[in-house]
C-alpha cells in the first residue's frame, strides 16, 4: 500500500526501451501519475520545444550569416549579438560628458606594450635614454608644430612609460588647412604614438616596438592638482623602484 505500482501495459507515447522489474515498467510517470493535468503537461512540453526551436534558429542564422547568405538577421540573433558586443567591448577610460578638445590641462600616461623596457634605464635616480627614448622625447617636443594652439608642460620618459601634461587652448587646431574640427586629446595621443612608433621601428632597430592600447588621462581641475602632478613627474625617476609600472630589467639595469 505504501509503494505506488504502475500498470504493466505497453507504453508507446515515449518510445524507446524499458526495463521490467517484477511486472513493473521503469519509465517516467504519466501526466496524471506526476500530478499534472493534461493542459499543464501540454504547456510544459510546448515551452520546451519552443526554446529548442529558438536555439536551432539562432544557430542557423549564425551559420548563414558567416557564409554571407543571410543579410537580414532575426530579432533573436540581433539580441544575442548585442549582448556579446556589450560583454566584450573595451571599457572606455574617459568621461562621456566631457569634451576632450576643451581648453585645460590634461595629464597623460602612456605605457609600452607589456611594459617592456624599451625607452631607457634608471641610473643614480636619473633616466638614461635609449635611442627609442630619445625619439619619444623629440616627438613629444614636436607636438605643438603638429597641433597649433597646444602647449606642453611637465614631461618625463621612464623605461617603459611616459608621463606628460598637455595644455589645450581655445586656438587649438590642426596644422592642415581646411580642417575645421578641433583635435581631441585622443587624436593628439594617437598621432604622438603613431609618429614615435614609426620612427622607432625604422631608425632605432626595434621592429617589434609598440604601445599599449589607449592611455591614462586625468583632467587637472585646479592649480593645486597641477602643481602636485608637476612635482610627481619631476620626482618620478627617483621613485622608479616603487613605481606601479616598475619592471625588473633582465639585463641587469635598474
Image (tube, rainbow, N blue to C red):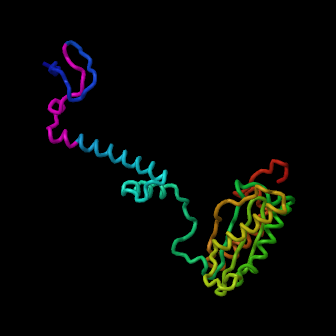
Residue name at image x 19 percent, y 24 percent: 11
Q: Is residue 11 above or below residue 148?
A: above
Q: Residue at x 69, y 76 (%)?
A: 166
Percent position of residue 32, x then y: 14, 32
> Toward which corner of the image does residue 115 lie, by quadrant?
bottom right
Number of marks in the image? Answer: 0
Residue 42: within the magenta? yes
Write down the region rendered in magenta.
23-43
Q: Nearer the viewer, residue 52 or 84?
A: 52
Left or right of 164? Residue 89 is: left
**Residue pictured at 28% horizontal, 24% vertical:** 16
Q: Choose top left, top right, bottom left or bottom right for residue 12.
A: top left
Instruction: List the single residue furthest toward the front.
Output: 69
Q: Where's the C terminus, which quadrant?
A: bottom right
Please name whichever residue, 23 or 152, is drawn nearer the observer in this view of the structure.
Answer: 23
Closer to us: 177 or 234: 177
Q: Main secondary structure of the magenta part?
A: loop
Answer left or right for 84 relative to 94: left
Where's residue 79, x and y in %? 40, 57
Give left or right: position of 131 versus 52: right
Amino acid at each position: 500500500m505504501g509503494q505506488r505500482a504502475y500498470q504493466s501495459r505497453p507504453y508507446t507515447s515515449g518510445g524507446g526501451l524499458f526495463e521490467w522489474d517484477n511486472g513493473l515498467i521503469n519509465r517516467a510517470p504519466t501526466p496524471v501519475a506526476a500530478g499534472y493535468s493534461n493542459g499543464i503537461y501540454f504547456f510544459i512540453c510546448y515551452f520546451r520545444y519552443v526554446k529548442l526551436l529558438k536555439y536551432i534558429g539562432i544557430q542557423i542564422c549564425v551559420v548563414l550569416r558567416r557564409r554571407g547568405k543571410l543579410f537580414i538577421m532575426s530579432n533573436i540573433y540581433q539580441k544575442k549579438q548585442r549582448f556579446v558586443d556589450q560583454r566584450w567591448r573595451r571599457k572606455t577610460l574617459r568621461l562621456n560628458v566631457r569634451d576632450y578638445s576643451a581648453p585645460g590641462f590634461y595629464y597623460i600616461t602612456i605605457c609600452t606594450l607589456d611594459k617592456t623596457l624599451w625607452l631607457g634605464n634608471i641610473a643614480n635616480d636619473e633616466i638614461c635614454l635609449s635611442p627609442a627614448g630619445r625619439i619619444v622625447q623629440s616627438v613629444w617636443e614636436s607636438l605643438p608644430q603638429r597641433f597649433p594652439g597646444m602647449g606642453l608642460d611637465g614631461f618625463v620618459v621612464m623605461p617603459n612609460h611616459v608621463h606628460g601634461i598637455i595644455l589645450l587652448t581655445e586656438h587649438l587646431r590642426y596644422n592642415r588647412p581646411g580642417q575645421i574640427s578641433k583635435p581631441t586629446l585622443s587624436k593628439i595621443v594617437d598621432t604622438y604614438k603613431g609618429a614615435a612608433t614609426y620612427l622607432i621601428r625604422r631608425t632605432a632597430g626595434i621592429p617589434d616596438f609598440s604601445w599599449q592600447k589607449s592611455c591614462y588621462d586625468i583632467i587637472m581641475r585646479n592649480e593645486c592638482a597641477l602643481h602636485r602632478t608637476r612635482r610627481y613627474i619631476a620626482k618620478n625617476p627617483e621613485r622608479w623602484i616603487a613605481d606601479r609600472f616598475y619592471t625588473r630589467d633582465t639585463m641587469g639595469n635598474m
